[in-house]
């Protein structure tokens, strides 16, 4: 009996020393491209009685108390640690954690601990991959005014993806499921009137009959949900478009050429008249003789 009690006490001590992560905690693997955002969902809705704590590689990075009054992100939770400065967001309703502008150094194990009457844990193994060279090459495009240009995100659109296009921070197009919207405000309608086309299969945006005023930054935000709706990955594709004017002469240059031609005509005409007068004079002198 004494041995059984000793074994149970040892088991309980081991549990509290090492935590419950080794005892069947749920796990989710996430892969994201550097620079994108990723949201790690708790899958629950808080009732103000829980405490939600997030850890990265066993270092606390975020916490919400039961009454939602104490929210801290990284530097506040861990003095002197600035790995995630201004790149973490917490959802007050669910405790979900969003990591923005991800870096390869953000790869690792994220642990969610929810404390209420009993504790529960979930593990997220996040891998942040380098930006592919192909994606870097497609960021800048240059076309001549009047031509069409297609901004291709280079991805395969999933039925549940939400794709939102912005031009210089102004919403210009959106695809949600099988529904799409183009230019819902007056400014957008005026600027791109009947000149935007969306490909529902890829999310590509085509600008027809381009103008120099179309030059600027175009951004595509893609929100993708996993089948379990636990993880939402947000990707950001950026394009810098430069529309150059049709090659040709400026009005000032055309005016200058016209003036020059007029001067040439005047000079040539004057020489012709002078030559004719001289010939007439010569003829008159010959007749007198």
Image (tube, helix red, strand yellow):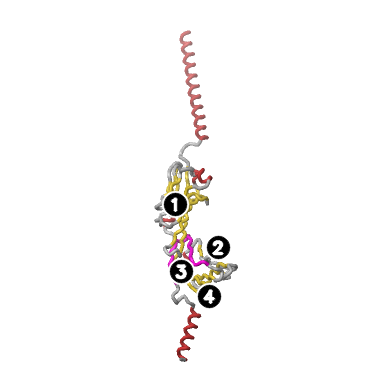
Please state which of residues 166 and 106 is positioned toward the viewer in this rendering: 166
How far is the residue under mark 1 from the one under mark 4?
44 Å
Q: CA distance from mark 4 to mark 2?
A: 32 Å
Q: Earlier in the sequence, mark 3 or mark 4?
A: 4
Cα distance, mark 2 to mark 3? 21 Å
Which circle's residue, 1 or 4, is located before the other in the chain?
4
Label drawn at residue 72: none
Q: CA distance from mark 1 to mark 3?
A: 32 Å
Residue stretch in magenta = 26-45
**Pointer 4: what residue?**
117
Res. 179 mark = 1
Mark 1 neighbour class, 10 Å CA radius: few under 14, some 14 to 19, many 20 or more: few
Label 3 SS = strand
Q: Which residue is mark 3?
A: 124
Question: Badge 4, how many Cα within 10 Å: few under 14, some, many 20+?
Answer: few
Q: Nearer the viewer, mark 2 or mark 1?
A: 1
Label 2 element class: loop
Of the two numbered discs 1 and 3 in the rendering, the one whose residue sits closer to the viewer = 1
Q: Residue 163 appears at what percent x and percent y?
A: 46, 54
Label 2 vs 1, first from the N-terminus: 2
Image spot of residue 141 (x, y percent): 45, 49
Mark nearer the viewer, 2 or 3: 3
Q: Main secondary structure of the magenta part?
A: strand
Secondary structure state at the residue bearing disc 4? loop
**From what the image shows, is residue 289 above or below residue 233?**
above
Q: Earlier in the sequence, mark 1 or mark 3?
A: 3
Residue 90 in view (yes/no): no
Between the C-alphas of marks 2 and 1, the distance is 34 Å
Q: Which residue is mark 2?
A: 86
Regarding residue 246, the answer to whether it shows in the image is yes
Lower sequence index among marks 4 and 2: 2
Tell me the mark number nearer the camera, choosing from 4 and 2.
4
């Amino acid at each position: 009996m004494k041995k059984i009690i000793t074994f149970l006490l040892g088991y309980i001590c081991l549990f509290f020393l090492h935590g419950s992560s080794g005892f069947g905690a749920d796990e989710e693997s996430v892969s994201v491209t550097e620079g994108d955002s990723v949201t790690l969902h708790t899958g629950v809705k808080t009732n103000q009685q829980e405490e939600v704590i997030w850890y990265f590689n066993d270092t606390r990075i975020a916490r919400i108390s039961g009454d939602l009054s104490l929210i801290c992100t990284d530097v506040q939770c861990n003095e002197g640690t600035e790995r995630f400065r201004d790149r973490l967001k917490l959802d007050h309703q669910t405790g979900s954690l969003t990591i923005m502008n991800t870096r390869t150094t953000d790869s690792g194990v994220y642990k969610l601990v929810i404390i209420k009457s009993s504790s529960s844990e979930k593990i997220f193994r996040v891998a942040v991959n380098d930006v592919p060279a192909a994606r870097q090459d497609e960021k800048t495009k240059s076309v001549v005014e009047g031509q069409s240009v297609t901004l291709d995100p280079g991805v395969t659109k999933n039925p549940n993806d939400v794709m939102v296009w912005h031009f210089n921070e102004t919403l210009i197009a959106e695809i949600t499921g099988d529904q799409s919207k183009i230019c819902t405000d007056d400014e957008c309608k005026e600027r791109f009137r009947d000149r935007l086309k969306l490909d529902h299969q890829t999310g590509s945006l085509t600008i027809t009959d381009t103008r120099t005023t179309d030059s600027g930054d175009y951004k595509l935000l893609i929100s993708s949900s996993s089948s379990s709706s636990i993880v939402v990955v947000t990707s950001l594709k950026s394009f810098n478009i430069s529309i150059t004017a049709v090659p040709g002469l400026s009005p000032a240059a055309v005016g200058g050429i016209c003036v020059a031609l007029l001067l040439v005509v005047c000079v040539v005409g004057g020489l012709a008249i002078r030559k004719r007068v001289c010939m007439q004079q010569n003829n008159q002198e010959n007749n007198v003789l």
